Image: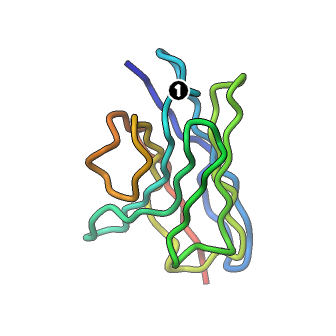
Amino acid sequence: QVQLEESGGGLVQAGGSLRLSCAASGRTFSSYAMGWFRRAPGKEYEFLAAVSWSGGITYYADSVKGRFTISRDGPKNTGYLQMNSLKPEDTAVYYCAAGGVFSNATDPYDYWGQGTQVTVSS
């Protein structure tokens, strides 16, 4: 089993930046692909970005491409999502996830964090 815990969320003004962290414990995090999702009030989970277990392949949703950067540090068992040029529509609860496959869908991911709130003011 893998346990994930997000941190780094908070309140930021439009145009600002935040870096989210995803700390992993349990089984070796480096053996899993990692994804970031978000869920705004009244909406379903939205895929943001994913990185392969090796870190060699990344994929971004069109809504965040060029603004967000996904990365991971295997020795620290930690994943990151750097978010720049934030917009009010980015306001949501952000989740990290781990799974055995590289995917932009929620179902393939076996492990999820509890989420961290990101609020972008206009």
Percent across and percent down for residue 113 are 42, 38
Q: Is residue 102 above or below residue 91?
A: above
Q: Is residue 48 left or right of residue 54?
A: left
Q: Residue at x 69, y 53 (%)?
A: 19
Dot 1 alpha-carbon crowd within 10 angstroms: few under 14, some 14 to 19, many 20 or more: some
Q: Is residue 117 above or below residue 90?
A: above
Q: Residue at x 71, y 76 (%)?
A: 85
Quarter holding the C terminus is: bottom right
- Give the residue type that dot 1 points to: Ser
Quarter holding the N terminus is: top left
Q: Is residue 93 left or right of residue 28?
A: left
Q: Give the residue at the far bottom of this rendering.
A: 122
Q: Which residue is mark 1?
A: 31
Q: Residue at x 54, y 19 (%)?
A: 28
In which image quadrant can residue 23 be found?
Answer: top right
Q: Is residue 100 above or below residue 17?
A: above
Residue in the foreground of this view, choosing between 122 and 52? 52
Percent across and percent down for residue 58 are 60, 56
Q: Secondary structure at mark 1?
A: helix
Q: Is residue 86 left or right of residue 105?
A: right
Residue in the foreground of this view, choosing between 104 and 64? 104
In which image quadrant can residue 67 be found?
Answer: bottom right
Percent across and percent down for residue 70 are 64, 53
